[in-house]
Image (cartoon, rainbow, N blue to C red):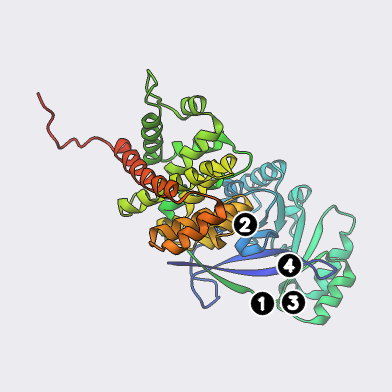
Amino acid sequence: MYSYVARQPIFNRQQRTVGYELLFRDGESNAFPVIEANKATCRLLVENYMAVGDNLATAGQRTFINFPQESLIRLLPMLLPKRKVIIEVLETCTPDEELFLAIKHLYRQGYVIALDDFEMAPQWQRFLPYIHIIKLDLMKTGVEQACQFVRQNRTRKIKFLAEKVETYEDYAAALKAGFHFFQGYYFSKPELLKNRQVEPEKLTTVRLLQEICREEVNFTRVEQIIASDVSLSYLLLRYVNTAAQRVVEPISSFKQALVYLGEEKIKIFVSAVATAHAAIDKPKELYSLSLQRARMCEMLASSSRLPFMKDKAFLTGLFSLLDALLDNSLEQLLELLPLEPEVQAALLKRQGELGQFLALLDAYEQADWAKVSEYCQVLKLNEELVAKSFHHALSWSSEYLSASEPPDESVPKEQ
């Protein structure tokens, strides 16, 4: 399945792109679909922001997103990073007390708020201290009336955005009147972006991987994500208790696991669990191969001149089949994960030492012994040691999976 989003750039007075407005689309016609506004916003967020990642749609610029009344009152914008989004309050919103309190709360949380298609109604006056940007539709309001409004309100601490700028004459008039930002067909028509969706049931996996791959991991957030999914919680506790066989009392919570294993080890475990979660509806062999590759890369790093990179090597091997597990391209998935550049280069281009470990592994799995010898020479690895590592990784992944599987309750126990 694919998701569709139209983006239209927003320019400053120097005609530099400062952001993009994202608009939900239901197909390749690039027209707004017949769908209720709150549903459109939710689908835009899930399919094109959380699942796809903002960098693909907006090239790292600010994202302008329309929020209807119900979404604002429910504080839906707080799901998104305040440094990357601008909340557009739709013109269909009613300026009542509930909306006022929601806008004030979002403002105090540090979000940038814009009034979309603003009309000069007195009911909106009390909102203005909490508004950063006012968007004026030049076609709807009229160029002269919109320009007059900007001239009259220049002293306010508010920036003005001219939308529906269709001609050079519109742009010149708006520029002269003092508008700060510009959007419209004169600059660029909305561009349709088509992305393969990450399936909703796999979004939890992606969110967990996003958190665990950060340089500074927020373990409270990791715990919240794991706690939100019963199967994830179950997998983590089984895997941790399998590894921690010498513990007298079973580990029964994420906090206990964190204390026992330490931050670095728990990162590895959570990564393995997230990968297992992605593989729930996949052939068991696919996850087994991911574990095998992870262990093999870890052992190659330990045996080479790079033992300090063994944790990175483990993750590199583990994530090397992520595209098959999540039914998405590796390029698109890695856009979502804050992996270190050397890990990304290894996964996408087989570059660097980590990439050479993967290339060696590829060659070994394909029985390309000439290439195996070539990579062993480059990495200064003994071929016999590589063969032993491969068989050890195969055995280790099999044991790991067997130990972490629940007992088969259908088999009667001996009396």
| Eye-nearest disc, 4 or 2 | 4
Circle 1/circle 4 CB separation < 8 Å: no
Determine the residue positioned at 27% across, 36% down.
406
Which residue is more in the foreground, 181 or 339?
339
Circle 3/circle 4 CB separation < 8 Å: no
| Eye-nearest disc, 2 or 1 | 1
Which residue position holds label 4? 10
Q: Element type at marker 2?
A: loop
Q: Element type at marker 4?
A: strand
- Residue 258 point in image, percent of width and height: 51, 29
Question: Which mark sits nearer the N-terminus, 3 or 4?
Answer: 4
| Number of numbered callouts drawn | 4
* Real-space Cα separation, disc 2 to disc 3, in angstroms: 28 Å
Q: Residue furthest left?
A: 415
- Residue 164 point in image, percent of width and height: 72, 74
* Real-space Cα separation, disc 3 to disc 1, in angstroms: 7 Å
Q: Element type at marker 1?
A: loop
Could you classify mark 1 by the number of other residues whose Cα lies within 10 Å: few (under 14), some (14-19), or many (20 or more)?
A: some
Which residue position holds label 2? 93
Question: Which mark sits nearer the N-terminus, 2 or 1?
Answer: 2
Which residue is more in the foreground, 357 or 128?
357
Which amino acid is tagged 1? Answer: Lys
Judge left or right: residue 237 versus residue 52: left
